[in-house]
Image (cartoon, helix red, strand yellow):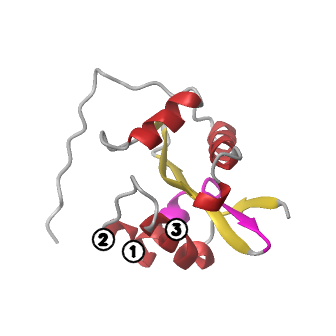
Amino acid sequence: MSVTILPFTISDYDEAYALWSVTPGIGLSSVDSREAIQHYLDENPDTSFVAREDGRLVGAVLCGTDRRRGYLNHLAVASSHRGQNLGRELVAHCLTALKSKGIVKCHIFVYQNNKEGTAFWEKIGWKKRMDLDIMSIDIPK
C-alpha cells in the first residue's frame, strides 16, 4: 500500500471535511462550506493537495496565496498515518506549488492550545512569530 498525493478537487470535499472534523486543532466554520471551498480552489488552483491510499483519503491541506504570500490551512493526516512524514510531504507539495508561482513566504495559523500542531510545525522548521497579533472580524451578511 502506498500513499499518492494528488491535487485537491471539490470531489475530495466530503472526505476532507470528515477528516478535518475529527482532527484536533482544526476549527471549522461557515467559510468551510462546500461552496466556500469551491471558491477557494477556483481562486487558488493547483496549490491544495490530498493524500490517498487505496482510494481512501488519508490527508488533506488547503493552500492559497494573496499573490504576495502563501497560506496553509487545515493540514490534517488520518491518525492511522501520522508519524510517517505524510504531513511533511503535503506541506512540501504546497511550498513547491507556491514557489512555482513566485511566492517566497508562507504563513499558517495555529491555535495557541494546539500543542501537537505547534510541535509538528516547529519540527519541520517553521518559526513562531512573536511580533504579530492576528485580528479578525465577521463581515455582516
Q: Is the C terminus in the top left, top right, bottom left or bottom right quadrant?
A: bottom left
Instruction: Provide residue 67's location: percent of width, then percent of height.
Output: 50, 42
Question: What is the three-letter code of the residue carrying label 3?
Answer: Leu
Q: Secondary structure at mark 3?
A: helix
Whichever of labels 2 and 3 marks the residue nearer the N terminus, that label is: 3
Instruction: Provide residue 111's location: percent of width, then percent of height.
Output: 33, 44
Position of 60 with respect to 110 (left or right) is right
Q: Nearer the viewer, mark 2 or mark 3?
A: 3
What is the C-alpha distance between the residues marked 2 and 3?
A: 17 Å
Q: Residue furthest top?
A: 131
The residue stretch that appears in magenta: 40-54
Q: Nearer the viewer, residue 17 or 62?
A: 17
Q: Secondary structure at mark 1?
A: loop
> Residue 19, labelled with which disc?
3
Instruction: Provide residue 20's location: percent of width, then percent of height.
Output: 47, 64
Residue holding disc 1: 33
Whichever of labels 3 and 1 marks the residue nearer the N terminus, that label is: 3
Residue depicted at x 46% and y 60%: 23
Residue 34 versus residue 125 in the image, above or below: below
Residue depicted at x 39% and y 39%: 115
Q: Residue furthest right?
A: 1
Residue holding disc 2: 30
Q: Is the N terminus in the top left, top right, bottom left or bottom right quadrant?
A: bottom right
What is the C-alpha distance between the residues marked 1 and 2?
A: 6 Å
Question: What is the three-letter code of the residue carrying label 2?
Answer: Ser
